[in-house]
Image (spheres, rainbow, N blue to C red):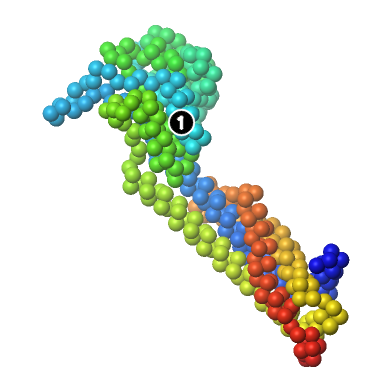
Amino acid sequence: MQPSLFAASLRVGVQTLRFNPLRTALSTLGVVIGVASLVAVLAVGDGAESFAREQIATTTDLQTLLVVPNTGETIDGVRVPRASYPLFTIADVGSLADAVGPAATVSAMVTGSARVGRRAAVVMALTPGAEERLRPRFASGRFISASEVKNAERVAVISPALAAAAGLSLGGSLPLEGRGFRVVGVLAPAAQRVAPLGMTAIVPYTVADSAMAPSPSPRAPQLMVRAARVEIVDSVRRLTEQWAARRLGAGWKDELSVATSSPMRLDQARQGIRVFKMVMGAFAGISLLVGGLGIMNVLLAAVTERTREIGIRKAAGARQRDILIQFLSESVAITGAGSAIGVVLGLAGAFAVTAVIRSASGAPIYAAVTWQTVSVAAVVAIVVGLAFGVFPALRAARLSPIDAIRHE
């Protein structure tokens, strides 16, 4: 088709929409409803999924793998200590992090005890990244920084019980085994789930030996591998086991174990997220179907009403492709305008719905606005407009000029 004829067909399609505002408004309304429903469902669904994932991450260990050295073995039903076992270093943390890539974060932890004056406390020595698993909340201060771990600085984060027993606050000096550790953070009551909230101090991994009481045998550090999502825990575990095989050889299973939370709980969480996505997709599909059928019905009615016009155009030299482009341009124009309005209304509805949910349930759930949601809604709306506009356009293009002109 020549560019001038193509432009003329588009121009006729747009002018037809302008000359029939009521029909155009009714057509657009169907698209607005469909797109608004789609955007609202996606935004609320993304927000609910984000809330569910956050709850899984903060209240469970489903996303965490523990790489624990085997410090003993069972022989004839008797637990016998092993003479040697892996002692993980900062280099091992970096090596495992490279092995699992961006799919997970890796940190190390070693625990012990220490005298605090005449009292005693549990001491946890951590590398950067461990706070993702602990999820601490603070009454004052902050968590240990990466530079403090790297430089082996004597700093500590303490539990409220230890702060009260030692009479310490932010900036004070905590005496662990007679050595002073500057307090950089005080945890809030019930601030963390993993470490006990008794007499607890958290120090950099690189100062573990100076912060803990001497031990007759080397302490066995454990590595914590936290997957970014529940769905990829199994793949992260495979990568971790491959790293262990390279690190320790074929007999690595005798040297350490890679432990996860209950496989049943993990499968339940993954299944719940999968079902949720399928339900949201079904709702979105129904919304699109309703909008698309509305477009097709209106365009079919337009073909019937404009049969004589189509016959005159074809008698004047318009070809089937000219009529086809005219009706498709009308369909795309309707869906484009409807999708823009529908996105705005859908987002407004999503924020309103989540506000009602927060008010009624107290759950911190918010609508999630992402560029993927907006782009999917816009692209799908145009695709639906084309798909549902093809049949009316083909019907119009295939009309015989003589029959069309004689049509009453």
Q: Is residue 66 above or below residue 26?
A: above
As drawn, is 280 to the left or to the right of 348? Answer: left
Residue shown at the point (37%, 25%) measured from the top left = 247
Horizontal and vertical percent position of residue 273: 45, 52
Residue shown at the point (65%, 49%) measured from the top left = 371
Residue placed under numbered mark 1 in the picture: 99
Horizontal and vertical percent position of residue 194: 39, 32
As drawn, is 264 to the left or to the right of 344? Answer: left
Can you name the residue that lies furthest to the top here?
A: 178
Q: Quadrant of the N terminus?
A: bottom right
Horizontal and vertical percent position of residue 259: 33, 35
Residue shown at the point (22%, 21%) measured from the top left = 81
Can you name the residue that lies furthest to the left here?
A: 76
Q: Amino acid at mark 1?
A: Ala
As drawn, is 180 to the left or to the right of 311? Answer: left
Q: Is residue 257 above or below residue 173?
A: below
Category of crowding for the residue at label 1, using alpha-carbon neighbours closer than 10 angstroms: few (below 14), some (14–19), many (at least 20): some
Seen from the viewer's position, the closer of residues 152 and 59 is 152
Q: Is residue 115 above or below residue 238?
A: above
As drawn, is 195 to the left or to the right of 182? Answer: left
Q: Quadrant of the C terminus?
A: bottom right
Whether residue 36 appears in this view of the structure is no
Residue shown at the point (82%, 76%) measured from the top left = 318
Seen from the viewer's position, the closer of residues 48 and 98 is 98
Circle 1: element type: helix
